[in-house]
Image: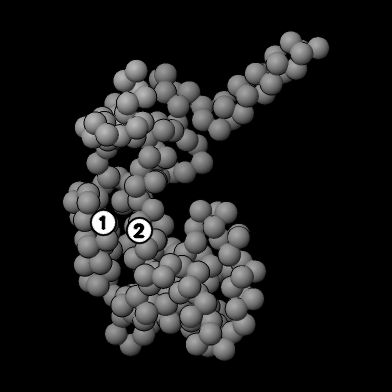
């Protein structure tokens, strides 16, 4: 019975793996995110992780939740409206969509986005656009650890389509794609293990050496 359960588990695991990441030329690729292109599944996930900082361009130093709370409070909107959608936004991996999920009314959504953009210094002149130059400058500072990645995002800040109703979550998606393509990683060492192991005091490296 145990052997049968084990075999069933293995078969299900193989089936899920095939559905999630089909094999092409001996490598696994993601089929769910077009931004991944022909990258291996691991490489794509590493690039996504490196580019998480892109969303921070549209946040105050306190983070997306506090930004939403502050602007909701400023507009007289109950904080429960924010709390109700936090889980959904983070579960999707897109905390920048908190405002998008709060209301169906375009006017209220736009007012909240305008408030957040103003707080982050990215609101354009007249209050109806996103300041692309400010966004590019902020990208260079926020992503300074990887110059090529910062340059790619800064360039995309000038070319990504301008979202309607200041829906900056769409801008974030465009910038993240540019960031993923501009990120510098070693295909043979996507997790940067070699660099980390230059530090002899690193416990993880010591374990790997034994």
Residue found 21% across the figure and 56% down from its top: 144
Residue found 42% across the figure and 81% down from its top: 114
User: Badge 2: how crowded within 10 Å, few (<14), some, or many (20+)?
Assistant: many
* Quarter occupied by residue 205: top left
Please indicate, yes or no, whether residue 187 appears anywhere in the rendered image: no
Image quadrant holding the N terminus, namely top right
Residue found 39% across the figure and 46% down from its top: 49
Q: How many marks?
A: 2
Q: Which residue is mark 1?
A: 143
Q: Which mark is residue 54?
A: 2
Image quadrant holding the C terminus, namely top left
Callout 2–callout 1 Cβ contact below 8 Å: yes
* Quarter occupied by residue 190: top left
Of residues 8 and 20, which is closer to you in this image?
Answer: 8
Residue found 51% across the figure and 27% down from its top: 22
Residue 29 vertical position relative to residue 48 in the rendered view, above or below: above
Of residues 21 and 199, which is closer to you in this image?
Answer: 199
- Classify mark 1: helix, strand or loop: loop
- Classify mark 2: helix, strand or loop: helix
Please indicate, yes or no, whether residue 20 appears anywhere in the rendered image: yes
From the top left corner, tell me how far across and down residue 136 is, in percent: 24, 65
- In the displayed structure, does residue 124 sit left or right of residue 21? left
Which badge, 2 or 1, comes first in the chain's sequence? Answer: 2
Residue pushed farthest right? Answer: 1
Separation (CA) of disc 2 from disc 1: 8 Å
């Amino acid at each position: 019975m145990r052997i049968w359960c084990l075999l069933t588990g293995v078969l299900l695991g193989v089936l899920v793996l095939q559905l999630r990441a089909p094999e092409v030329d001996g490598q696994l690729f993601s089929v769910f995110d077009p931004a991944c292109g022909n990258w291996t599944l691991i490489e794509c996930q590493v690039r996504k992780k490196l580019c998480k900082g892109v969303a921070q361009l549209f946040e105050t130093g306190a983070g997306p939740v506090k930004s939403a709370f502050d602007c909701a409070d400023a507009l007289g909107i109950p904080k429960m409206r924010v709390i109700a959608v936090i889980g959904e936004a983070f579960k999707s991996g897109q905390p920048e969509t908190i405002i998008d999920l709060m209301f169906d009314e375009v006017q209220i959504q736009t007012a909240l986005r305008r408030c957040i953009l103003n707080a982050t210094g990215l609101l354009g002149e007249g209050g109806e656009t996103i300041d692309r130059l400010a966004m590019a400058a902020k990208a260079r500072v926020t992503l300074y650890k990887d110059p090529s990645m910062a340059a790619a995002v800064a360039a995309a800040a000038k070319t990504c389509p301008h979202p309607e109703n200041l829906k900056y979550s769409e801008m974030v998606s465009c910038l993240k794609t540019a960031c993923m393509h501009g990120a510098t990683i070693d295909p043979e060492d996507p997790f940067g293990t070699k660099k980390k192991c230059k530090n002899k005091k690193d416990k993880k490296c010591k374990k790997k050496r034994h």
